[in-house]
Amino acid sequence: MPANFSAYATPVLLLVLSNVFMTFAWYGHLKFKSSPIWIVIFASWGIAFFEYCLQVPANRLGHAVYSAPQLKGMQEIITLLVFAGFSVWYLGEQIKWNHVAGFALIVVAAFLIFWE
C-alpha cells in the first residue's frame, strides 16, 4: 500500500460518513410524517451538525490531493450511492430503471471531472 494512500482514502471515507448523516437529516423524517414540522427541522439541524463535522475536514484534507471539482464529483457519486441504499433499506422504496439510468448519467458526469 502506498505511503500516501490515507491522503486519498481518508477524504473519501469522511465523505461517505458525512453523507450518511446528511441523508438522514434530509430524508429520515419522511418516516415520521405525524411529527410537527418544527421538531423535524430542529432534529434535521442536529443531525446535519455531525455531517458538517465530517464534511468540512473531508474537503480540507481532500483538497491536498484532489481538486475542488473532483471533491464535488466524488461527493455527488457518494450521495447517490448512500441515498439509493437509504431509500431501499430505510424508506422501503424501490429504485427503478429510470432512477438507475439518471444516476448513471451523473456518474458519467463525475467521471469526466477526473479525466485528465
Image (tube, rainbow, N blue to C red):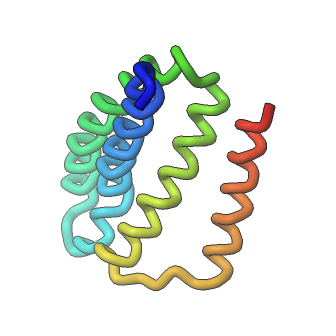
Q: Return the residue nearer the eye: 31 or 56.
A: 56
Which residue is at 38% across, 27% downward? 6
Q: What x and y, as percent, mark residue 67?
A: 63, 23
Above or below, 56 relative to 115? above
The quarter of the image holding the N terminus is top left
Q: Return the residue nearer the eye: 65 or 83.
A: 65
Q: What x and y, as percent, mark residue 104?
A: 68, 65
Q: What x and y, as percent, mark residue 13?
A: 36, 39
4 relative to 39 in the view: left or right = right
Q: Is residue 111 visible?
A: yes
Total residue callouts: 0
Q: Is residue 11 visible?
A: no
Q: Return the residue nearer the eye: 82 or 52.
A: 82
Above or below, 66 relative to 100? above
36 relative to 110 in the view: left or right = left
Q: What x and y, as percent, mark residue 9?
A: 42, 34
Q: Residue furthest front?
A: 1
Which residue is at 77% across, 43% downward? 112
Which residue is at 73% across, 62% downward? 105
The quarter of the image holding the C terminus is top right
Which residue is at 36% across, 22% downward? 57
Q: Quadrant of residue 45?
A: top left
Q: Residue furthest top?
A: 64
73 relative to 21 in the view: left or right = right
Above or below, 95 relative to 22? below
